[in-house]
Image (cartoon, grey):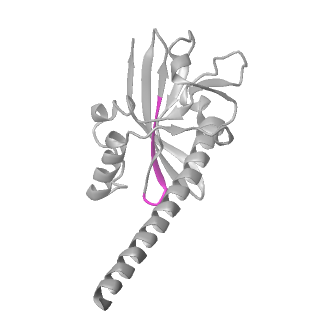
Amino acid sequence: MEKRMTVYIFMISFILLYNNINAQATKKYKVEYCKFLKFIRNDIFENLGYKNISLQKDTINILEYTANKDLFISIPFYGNISTNDILNEEEKIEVIKKIYQDSTENKIEISCIDKCYLIPEIIAKKMNSIIYKFSNPVFAKNYSICYFSVGIYNDEYKTQNSYLFIKKHGAWKLVKRIGGIYGN
């Protein structure tokens, strides 16, 4: 009976510890996710060649959630997802899994992104204007590397670009464009 009780206590302790660690990781991701979206919108969006096309000159239309579905498609055409061997083979495999197997749709909190209209997908499909779709930021190496993809969708034109960013001295820097698809 005493051994059983010890096993139960151990199992409950392990479950509580796992849930605590998982909750901390999720919270960290949400904080970094929000910081990265602010960086994309406020610091680099126009430098990547995207335009503000909406009723207000400095405001963009984006889908109300981030998701990897239909994004990052262009990476295989460019080969290696890394540059200067910043990731080892195990880390590359983990990043590739996150990119292609993550089916999560994260609703964008309005506090995470400035100067935009968050458009529901059902409305976006009916709109006759450019809508941007953002991928989930895919972080590696303790949130110091990020893979990110932006798609432009409307009825006539579909394109996307994927990028690699590195955080140096607390600030994100674009390393390179790692893929792109242009088409109708």
Q: Residue at x 59, y 31 (%)?
A: 47
Q: Position of residue 58 (x, y in %)?
A: 71, 24
Q: Residue at x 32, y 40 (%)?
A: 100
Q: Residue at x 59, y 59 (%)?
A: 169
Q: Is residue 145 magenta?
A: yes
Give the vertical position of 29 relative to 81 (above or below). Answer: below
Residues 53 and 78: in front is: 53
Q: Is residue 4 magenta?
A: no
Q: Is residue 35 left or right of residue 8?
A: right
What secondary structure is the magenta-colored segment mainly?
strand
Q: Quadrant of residue 13?
A: bottom left
Q: Position of residue 54 (x, y in %)?
A: 66, 17
Q: Position of residue 116 (x, y in %)?
A: 66, 28
Give the vertical position of 18 relative to 122 (above or below). Answer: below
In the rendered view of the protein, which quadrant contains the C terminus? Answer: top left
Q: Is residue 70 left or right of residue 42?
A: left
- The stretch in magenta equals 141-150
In the rendered view of the protein, which quadrant contains the N terminus? Answer: bottom left
Q: Quadrant of residue 107?
A: top right
Q: Position of residue 14 (x, y in %)?
A: 39, 74
Residues 150 and 84: in front is: 150
Q: Tag count in the figure?
A: 0
Residue projecting furthest to the front: 1
